[in-house]
Image (cartoon, rainbow, N blue to C red):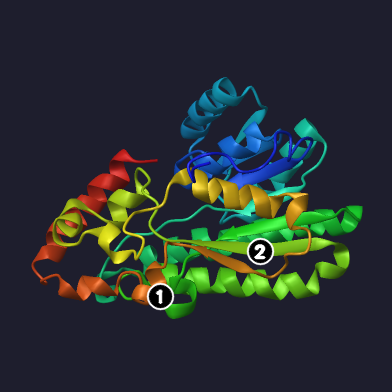
Amino acid sequence: MKYTEPMLREGALQGKTILVTGGGTGLGYSMSKYFLQLGANVVIASRKIEVLEQAASELQAETKGQVLPIACDVRHYTEVEKTIEATLNRFGNINALVNNAAGNFISPTERLSPKAFDTIVGIVLQGSYNCTLAVGKHWIAQKQPGVILNIVTTYAWTGSGYVVPSACAKAGVLALTRSLAVEWAKYQIRSNAIAPGPFPTKGAWERLFPPAVQDKINIAQKVPLGRVGHHQELANLAAYLISDYSAYINGEVITIDGGEWLNGAGEFNFLNQLPASMWDEIERAVRSANKTSS
């Protein structure tokens, strides 16, 4: 068996409903697809309904599963509440929440505007605690067990230059994960996290590793295993942590990065190697990626 193949048995998530923020693109799409293949109903939520509807159509065609796309800006608690209400109206329950919605780009911190900082922290940290609080309140009121899975990053605990808003926000999400693992365990609500290394995705990859960076740095060579991650590897891990097979795992953050962070803490600290003049070119590339991606 290869690491690119599904891991869990057929029907391992049968009957479960999983809410995935940022589920219409990238790793969120890949996780949602595997959840569906394992029998779950999936709700995908993000800001752009046209992207979600296209993703839902593709996912349903590929898996024959049930997908509900909902436009939701996770920075706004009222929109999160409406998303939960719509999910309950459609599927009757929510069994798991995957806080995957994120925003990130590389930049020297002194070049950032307050708005840029606020946007990243708002999506990543505020969005995660909004969804966690709303879903958690529902589970507790209903006396229903649940699972929270947060997508963080290895620099949540090491820090990293050039992605400081993301590092701050992801560190907060990691603290949220570990804190609620203790506090909410009495309600049979588990809370875990995954810290991925390099997993190429359209859009996010272009903002983090624009051509000017890729020309200078071989990303795969930063990883001791000598390669980047395959989406099925992360989907396998996410499905396991969502499933009942992981019922005794609580408060854990699992790194899946081929040993990258051990090889050099601070995932983007290598950007010190770039000359100052190159940042204008990188900024143009990032802005272009923002316009063309979801």
Outermost residue on the right side: it is 143
In this rendering, position of residue 91 left or right of residue 153? right
| Label located before the other in sequence (2 or 1) | 2
In this rendering, position of residue 183 left or right of residue 285? right
Task: Count numbered badges in the picture.
Answer: 2
Query: In the image, residue 246 lies at what x, y percent?
Result: 73, 57
The C terminus sits in image quarter: top left
Query: In the image, residue 195 lies at what x, y percent?
Result: 51, 63
Query: For the residues carrying marks 2 and 1, which lies nearer the camera in this image?
Result: 1
In this rendering, position of residue 25 left or right of residue 180? left
| Residue to which mark 1 is pinned | 262
Q: Secondary structure at mark 2?
A: strand
The quarter of the picture where residue 110 lies is bottom left
Circle 2 crowding by C-alpha within 10 Å: few under 14, some 14–19, many from 20: many
Q: Residue 192's mark?
A: 2
Q: Residue at the location (60% across, 60% down)?
A: 150
Task: State the residue in front, 262 or 140.
Answer: 262
Whether 209 is drawn above or below 179: the answer is above
The quarter of the picture where residue 44 lies is top right
Q: Secondary structure at mark 1?
A: helix
Q: Amino acid at mark 1?
A: Leu
Q: CA distance from mark 2 to mark 1?
A: 21 Å
Q: Amino acid at mark 2?
A: Asn
Regarding residue 106, the answer to whether it shows in the image is: yes
Circle 1 crowding by C-alpha within 10 Å: few under 14, some 14–19, many from 20: few
Query: In the image, residue 252 lies at what x, y percent?
Result: 65, 69
Q: Disc 2 vs disc 1: Cβ atoms closer than 8 Å?
A: no
Q: Residue at the location (79% across, 35% down)?
A: 15
